[in-house]
Amino acid sequence: MVIGQWTCSMRLLCLDLGNTHTHFGVVGPAGADVMGEVPTAAIDEPATGFGRRLTRLVADQPAPVGVAFCSVVPAATPRLRQVLATALPGLPVFQLTAACELGVPITYPRPTEIGQDRLANAAGARSLATGAAVVIDLGTAVTFDIITGHGGYEGGIIAPGLAVMRAYLHERTAQLPLLDDSLALDGAIGRSTVEAMRIGMVVGFHGMIQALLDAVLAELAARGGPMPAVFATGGDAGRLLGRLRPPAQIVPDLTLRGLAVAWRLNFSPSK
């Protein structure tokens, strides 16, 4: 059974449980109008975890009609469910999996291997673009998800994210420091170890993203297909603004939007 049309009064709590952070938002017809994040490792901490923030969030807003979430951290999933059961007792909870309807077919050979956040991204992209689309999600890992008009969700790419690169350089060398979050550059030639590392990170990271996108677009073009829409989301998506060709549309709440789409297509209180 499919839920009926989304109305202006309906609001859904959506959560993307990731390796480093759990992102959440209250999603309505126009997207997520209330967003935030908590460290996944502390999601069920009594004093600082998600439960307290969730209680305040619900108290300040109209009550959500349900909860939709995706998780790429299986060990943390039951902890999240317990937090939800305590903070929002009785509210229906839906977890996105490869067995769910996304609004786009999956032709990937092993659908259960696809991260649930990537499934949500595919659903979100299809809700914004009816044809082909490429989603670039820049989190702990960088993922590309490719949706075509003929094959639906066909597959993608997984690469290291900025935080992984930053940590790896420090952890696997004896003398390289751990860079802070500032990635501002004064030029392309480093005059200190920190400057040299930042240039390698920033220029190299953008170059990696562009090279991967070029390869995907070339393969799709070789098939004779139309130019896909390109969406970027995730914590580091803003760093791509104006740097990619073709430009990516930055959609910070794409994963949460996709969860709301999947909830509407799949959830029924009678199930």
Image: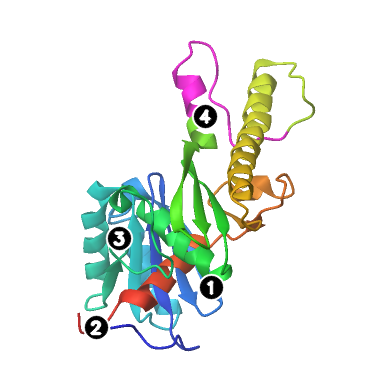
Does the magenta portion include 166? yes
Q: Which residues are magenta?
A: 165-184
Q: Which residue is found at the position 66% from the left and 53% from the top? A: 248
Tally the marks. 4
CB under 8 Å between discs 4 and 3: no
Per the model, the C-alpha gap separating discs 4 and 3 is 29 Å
Does the magenta portion include 141? no
Amino acid type, residue under disc 4 in the picture? Met
Residue on which disc 2 sits: 269
In this view, the mark in front (4 or 3): 3
Mark toward the start of the polypeptide (1 vs 3)? 1
Q: Residues within 10 Å of mark 4 (few under 14, many from 20)?
A: some
Helix, strand or loop under label 2:
loop
Is 179 drawn above or below residue 152 in the view shown? above
Q: Which residue is found at the position 28% from the left and 52% from the top? A: 112
Q: Position of residue 144 (x, y in %)?
A: 51, 47
Residue sitting nearer the eye, 81 or 210: 210
> Which quadrant does the N terminus fall into?
bottom left
Per the model, the C-alpha gap separating discs 4 and 2 is 44 Å
> Which quadrant does the C terminus fall into?
bottom left
Q: Which residue is found at the position 79% from the left and 29% from the top? A: 186
Residue on which disc 1 sits: 31
Mark toward the start of the polypeptide (4 vs 2)? 4
Per the model, the C-alpha gap separating discs 1 and 2 is 23 Å
Residue on which disc 4 sits: 165
Work out which residue is located at the far right of the displayed protein and give it. 187
Amino acid type, residue under disc 3 in the picture? Thr
Amino acid type, residue under disc 1 in the picture? Gly
